[in-house]
């Protein structure tokens, strides 16, 4: 019966994924801790920067070489990615994404990993995934509701899974240590002994995870490390021996108990000073221990200060923040690992508003009031139970981040509004009607220039709310204005081209407007969705006649003009 660990770190990636210098350093730190015979006592094997095929082969062969009564620990540090069904994949050196979509054959599926572990018949399995999910690169964790279903994909009897995050948030690199924040505290919890919560001389996987989770959340509250185990059996697995209860460890444990939000009360300071003398510790050693313990709190305060400064500078440049700027601020907030509640008091005191509320859908009564004002009295559409059902489907699709379906439903809503179809709406039939017609004929400039405002406003609010300001008509109008386009209903070809470049409808001088070419992911360029008009399918994917681009552009410009009329 042996203890074996396979530690995998991927720092180098193809050009469409950023490098992660911390990943290979994480492996070195875990090897030091797990391989120490006085601590982890594992026989350690490492695998650095493998290609996808080598990654899969090494894991499978390593597992097949072990016995049923062995304890195995599989650790990965690097990019974690998910497909459109939120299935988890592990990034390899050659992992690729094309137009925001993961090329599945270039990444290692968590479902395949589950099969490898299941077929190995090893009774005690530990899996640690310290995945960096970077929202700037495709559908790699943007902070939203898109949790990866790790329990379904990786849980099994006899297996315990630790993850730095289960949702679409970030796994940060600590600048001082050079390690990812989760791995840093896994290592510290064992090497310093502070993870031995009950003082019994051994560190269980649950004790280690709880220690690391607490320290991570002190610095980055938006992160949500998880432990997954069935029947509570995995919690009791011993991962390491605790260091002997030496004076420094005694003092460190007491410091951990007494710290409160990075500070110590006067009585706590007195007790620590007394304990310092009892343990025979020098002032410099004690101060170093205290500094390590309060470091996560100081990092949290630094991030709050950074966000506050960024918000102030944004307001100096743009006193009335645009939705584009607000979206970038919220994206930066997520990058810092801060929750909305963490920055609430900053936004209220500095900006006088809660920025996330800019995306909230108003109460129905307020929406009706807005739509009945004299600014566009003629623009109300007919309402019915039939069309309300379509709105419900749109909201559900957006909530579940089914962007392509939401785009289809948006086109359906606008089509039935133009055709004045309000009862017994069959979405499939409507979809076919749109598909078998040239959509530019349906959504013509003349039709869009007088489109009912209440429908546009309601659709826009839903898109803005569930995309956190990334998609929607309001955002498209702001991007178009930044491209020097005017909202006067006229077609500005150069501005439309610039808009296409900005939102990913155009790449390297070629339009990408077929439905199959759109990026149906949570992190496509801002303003990419929704799209109403697709070219005729018989055109080349890399070339459309200039006449058709102008037809699409004229309809788009008419819609932009209508956005202004409707106060979007």
Image: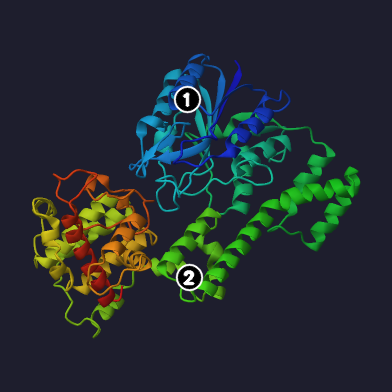
The picture places residue 153, in percent across and down from the top left corner, at 40, 34
The picture places residue 375, in percent across and down from the top left corner, at 25, 83
Above-or-below relation of 22 to 258? above
Residue 378 is drawn in which quadrant?
bottom left
| Front residue of 296 and 515 | 515
Q: Which mark is residue 354?
A: 2
Residue 269 is drawn in which quadrant?
bottom right
Which residue is identified by label 1?
55
| Front residue of 167 and 321 | 321
Residue 100 is drawn in which quadrant?
top left
| Front residue of 110 and 20 | 20
Above-or-below relation of 229 to 387? above
Residue density around tag 2, few if under 14, some if 14–19, many if 20 or more, within 10 Å: some
Q: In the structure shown, which secondary structural element does the residue marked by tag 1 occupy? A: helix
Q: How is the image coloured?
A: rainbow
Between the residue at mark 2 and the residue at mark 1, the CA separation in whole angstroms equals 45 Å
Q: Is residue 352 visible?
A: yes
Left or right: 470, with 235 as reference point: left
Q: In the structure shown, which secondary structural element does the residue marked by tag 2 occupy? A: loop
């Amino acid at each position: 019966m042996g203890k074996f660990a396979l530690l995998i770190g991927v720092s180098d990636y193809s050009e469409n994924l950023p490098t992660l210098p911390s990943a290979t350093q994480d492996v070195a730190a875990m090897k030091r801790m797990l391989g120490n015979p006085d601590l982890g006592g594992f026989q350690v094997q490492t695998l650095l920067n493998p290609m996808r095929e080598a990654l899969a082969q090494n894991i499978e062969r390593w597992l097949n070489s072990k016995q049923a009564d062995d304890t195995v620990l599989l650790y990965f540090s690097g990019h974690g990615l998910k497909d459109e069904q939120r299935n988890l994949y592990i990034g390899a050196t050659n992992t690729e994404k094309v137009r925001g979509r993961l090329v599945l054959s270039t990444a290692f599926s968590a479902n395949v990993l589950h099969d490898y572990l299941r077929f190995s018949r090893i009774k005690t399995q530990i899996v640690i995934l310290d995945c960096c999910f970077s929202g700037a690169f495709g559908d790699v964790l943007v902070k939203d509701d898109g949790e990866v279903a790790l329990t379904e994909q990786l849980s099994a009897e006899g297996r315990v899974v630790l993850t730095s995050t289960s949702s679409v948030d970030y796994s940060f690199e600590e600048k001082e240590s050079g390690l990812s924040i989760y791995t840093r505290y896994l290592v510290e919890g064992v090497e310093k002994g502070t993870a031995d919560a009950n003082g019994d001389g051994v560190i269980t996987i649950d004790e280690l995870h709880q220690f690391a989770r607490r320290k991570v959340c002190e610095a980055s509250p938006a992160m949500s490390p998880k432990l997954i185990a069935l029947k509570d059996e995995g919690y009791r697995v011993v991962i390491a021996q605790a260091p002997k209860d030496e004076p420094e460890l005694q003092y460190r444990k007491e410091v951990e108990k007494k710290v409160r939000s990075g500070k110590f009360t006067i009585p706590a300071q007195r007790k620590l000073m007394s304990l310092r003398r009892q343990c025979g510790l020098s002032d410099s050693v004690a101060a170093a221990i205290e500094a390590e313990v309060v470091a996560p709190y100081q990092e949290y305060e630094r991030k709050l200060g950074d966000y506050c400064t960024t918000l102030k500078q944004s307001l100096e440049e743009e006193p009335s923040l645009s939705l584009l700027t607000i979206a970038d601020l919220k994206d930066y907030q997520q990058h810092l690992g801060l929750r909305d509640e963490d920055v609430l008091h900053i936004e209220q005191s500095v900006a006088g508003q809660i920025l996330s509320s800019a995306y909230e859908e108003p109460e129905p009564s307020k929406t009706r009031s807005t739509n009945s004002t004299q600014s566009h009295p003629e623009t109300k559409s007919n309402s019915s139970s039939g069309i309300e059902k379509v709105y419900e489907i749109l909201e559900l699709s957006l909530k579940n981040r089914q962007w392509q379906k939401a785009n289809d439903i948006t086109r359906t809503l606008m089509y039935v509004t133009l055709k004045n179809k309000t009862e017994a709406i069959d979405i499939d039939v409507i979809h076919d009607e749109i598909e078998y017609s040239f959509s530019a004929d349906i959504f013509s400039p003349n039709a869009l220039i007088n489109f009912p405002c209440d429908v546009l406003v309601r659709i826009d609010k839903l898109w803005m709310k569930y995309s956190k300001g990334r998609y929607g008509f309001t955002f498209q109008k702001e991007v178009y204005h930044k491209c020097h386009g005017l909202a006067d209903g006229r077609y500005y070809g150069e501005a439309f081209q610039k808009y296409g470049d900005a939102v990913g409808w155009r790449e390297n001088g070629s339009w990408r407007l077929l439905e199959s070419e759109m990026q149906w992911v949570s992190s496509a360029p801002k303003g990419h969705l929704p799209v109403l008009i697709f070219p005729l399918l018989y055109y080349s994917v890399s070339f459309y006649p200039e006449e058709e681009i102008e037809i699409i552009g004229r309809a788009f410009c008419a819609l932009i003009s209508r956005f202004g009329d409707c106060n979007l």
